[in-house]
Amino acid sequence: MTNRVAKEAGAKVVVVPQSPGALKGTEDYVTHLDHVVGALAAALK
Amino acid sequence: MLELGLRRLARGAATRHLVLALGAVALAGAGIASVHGAEPKPRVVATLPDLFVLTRAVAGDLAALELIARFGQNPHDMEVRPSQILMVRRADVVIRTGLEEDAWIDVMVQRAANPKVLRGSPNVVEAFQGLEVLKVMSGRVDRSMGDVHPLGSPHYTLDPDNVATVTANITAGLTHAAPEQARAFEANRQAFLEKVAEADRRWKAALAPFRGAGVVSYHDSWPYFYRAFGLAEAGIIEDRPGVPPSPQHLTNLIRTMREQKVRVILHESWYPRT
C-alpha cells in the first residue's frame, strides 16, 4: 500500500525502525536516531 | 468429546509447568540474596524497546534488566505469554510508557500476582510523566477508531529533548529499588545525556536544510520527531491505527501529497509495504 501511494504521489519510501532494534544496527538510542535521521535526510535531498 | 478432554489435559499440564517454573524462579531469587550476602541487583522490566535502551543507559550493569516486547515486534500485536508473566512476577521495578501503547502490561501484572508492581506503586515508572503529551484525544473513543491512544501519542522518546525527563523518571524508579546505587545511576544518566546532546547537534544539523518539509508516514508514530526537527506532518496512510485505510482516504492523501510536493513517506519497518 505504501509503495502504491508513493508511486502515485511521486514520493520515495524510506523504511525506518520505529523503535531501537527494529532494524539491525539500531540497538541503542543514538544508533536508532542516527539511522532515522540519516535515511530521512538522504531522501529529502 | 475426546478433543475437549485432550484440551483440558493440555491446559492442566501447562498450568502445572507454570507453577513449577514460578517456584523455581522464586527459589533462584532467594538464592541470589543469600549466597552473596550483599544487596541483590534489582530486577527491572521495561515494556518496550525504547524504554529498555534508556533504562539500560541509566542502570548499566547495576540492574538485571529484561524487555517484554522483543526488538522489532509491533507492540500492537502482543500476545501475553507465560515467559512474560514470569518476568513480571519476579520484577522489582516496571518501566512503562504511561500512555497505553503497552496496556497489556496490566494483564501481565494481574496474572503475575506481584503486588510490588501494581500500577500506582513507586516501583512502577510511568515514563511520560513531566512531558508535554501530543495528540491527546477528546470526545468519544471506541474500537471502531482502531488502536488509538486516547491519552496521547506514546512515541515521545523520538524527541531527544524528552530524554532528560524520561531518564529522570527511570532513575527515580531504579533509585527507589536500590537506593545505595543512587549516585551511580545519576552518573550514568548524566554521561548518557551528554552523548545524546552531542548526537542531537549532529541530527539537527543534518535536517536543518529541510526545515518545514512535509512528510507522510504509514503509522502515526512521528509527532514528537517532527516537532523536534522542524518537519511537518503532511498525512498518515493508516488513518485509523491497525485498520486498513479506505480508498477515499488514500485518494485524498495522494492529492494532498501532490499539491504539497511531499517527497518522502516514512514506513515503519514492521508493517508490510504492499
Image: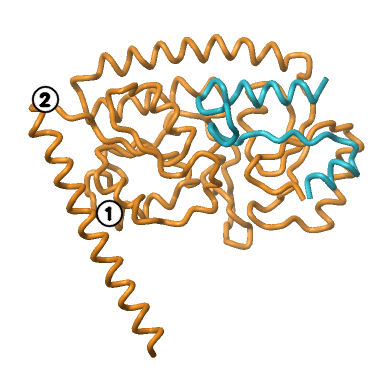
Chain colours: A cyan, B orange
Q: Are marks 1 and 2 in contact (CB under 8 Å)?
A: no
Disc 1 to disc 2, C-alpha distance: 27 Å
Q: Residue B259 at x, y = what percent?
A: 91, 36
Q: Chain of mark 2?
A: B
Q: Label 2, on which residue?
A: B38
| Residue that extends furthest to the bottom in the rendered view of this protein | B1
Counting from the top left corner in percent of width and height, residue B114 is at: 23, 50
* Kind of residue sitting beneath label 2: Ala
Q: Residues within 10 Å of mark 2 (few under 14, many from 20)?
A: few
Residue nearest the viewer, comparing B39 with B211: B39
Q: Secondary structure at mark 1?
A: helix
Quarter residue B198 falls in: top right
> Which residue is at a point 71% across and 43% down the rendered structure image?
B218
On screen, residue B115 versus residue A16, left or right, reads: left
Q: Residue at x 81, y 44 (%)?
A: A3
In the rendered image, which residue does mark 1 sit on? Answer: B112
- Camera-side residue: B168 or B177? B177
